[in-house]
Amino acid sequence: MGVNKVQINYDNGNGIEVRVNDNSATLQDLLDAWQPLCDDERLYKLYAQNQHRECRGCTVNCCNTAYVIPDLIAFKKMAKFTGLDYPEFITRYFQKDKLRVGLLRMQPDPCIFLQDNVCTIYPLRSLICRFYLCCKVAGDTEQLIYSLSWTGAAATQLFVEELGLLPGSSGYGLSSFDMMFKKLIEDYRYDPNVKLFMKAREYSDIPLAPFI
Ligand code: SF4
Ligand code: SF4
């Protein structure tokens, strides 16, 4: 049997650890390997029932409070799903006071796509949503998923700015979370890997190697 291009290891000491076994691995390979973790009852999840139940049915549900700035692939797919053009999608689905300070945060508390405790766009959700788990993640793996999620979010920011749909940012009225996320977007917007997200249609178009 062949070795998977991306392998996930888990132990309670180190947490979740990603190993990339093949230089041709893509972001989609990583997502395919990561997805079963949501249902993996071996993991210690801080907010899960008994700390070991699957995410489905979680009563805390991180979607209630999530701060989601979508990556560009998810942004385009979600807009298409709603049937709205980009200006209307942004107006209806993103938090207005965050738009005013130059941040593309999807409407929260709970997330606008959450209904009856279930994500209504689950197959289209963004990288931030896909990677978040309330459990320990090994250092290198945390850096990898962080870098992928924020490079993708910076690509969305650039794309929307280029369309003239995000007003100039101001520093007024920013919460500490806003400032942190704004800084992350600023840090990543000049990353050469942003171009990979700008060109890609699917996660399978994005190679993992430049992020490792
Ligand atoms: S990751 Fe989210 S849904 Fe899953 S157990 Fe933690 S809080 Fe609940
Ligand atoms: S898009 Fe879906 S997974 Fe992401 S926060 Fe909203 S409801 Fe949760």
Image: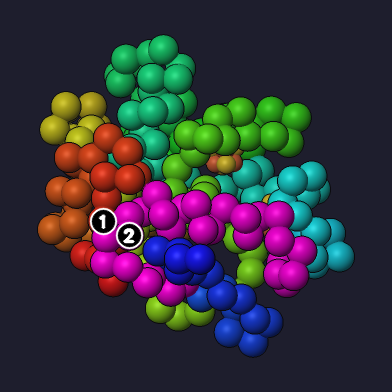
- Please check the rendered image and state whether residue 208 is part of the magenta-colored stretch, yes or no: no
Do residues under tags 1 and 2 come within 8 Å of each other at their CB atoms?
A: yes
Image mark count: 2
Residue 135 appears in the rendering: yes
Packing grade of label 1 (10 A; few <14, some 14-19, many >=20) is: some
SS at circle 2 = loop
Q: Position of residue 63 (x, y in %)?
A: 62, 44
Q: Depth-wise, is mark 1 or mark 2 nearer the camera? A: 2
Residue under numbered circle 2:
25
Residue drawn 28% across the image and 71% down it: 212
Vertical order, 108 against 143 (above or below): above
Packing grade of label 2 (10 A; few <14, some 14-19, many >=20) is: some
Q: Position of residue 157 (x, y in %)?
A: 25, 42
179 sits to left or right of 163 = right
Residue 101 appears in the rendering: no
Q: What amino acid is labelled 2 in the image? A: Ala
Residue 120 circle label? none
- Where on the image, by quarter, is ligand 1? bottom right
Residue drawn 75% across the image and 55% down it: 54
Residue under numbered circle 1:
207
Q: What amino acid is labelled 1 in the image? A: Pro
125 or 204: nearer the eye? 204
Residue located farthest toward the front when viewing the structure as drawn: 1
Q: Quadrant of residue 193?
A: bottom left
Q: Which residues are magenta?
A: 18-46
Residue drawn 64% across the image and 69% down it: 135
SS at circle 1 = loop
Q: Position of residue 125 (x, y in %)?
A: 49, 38
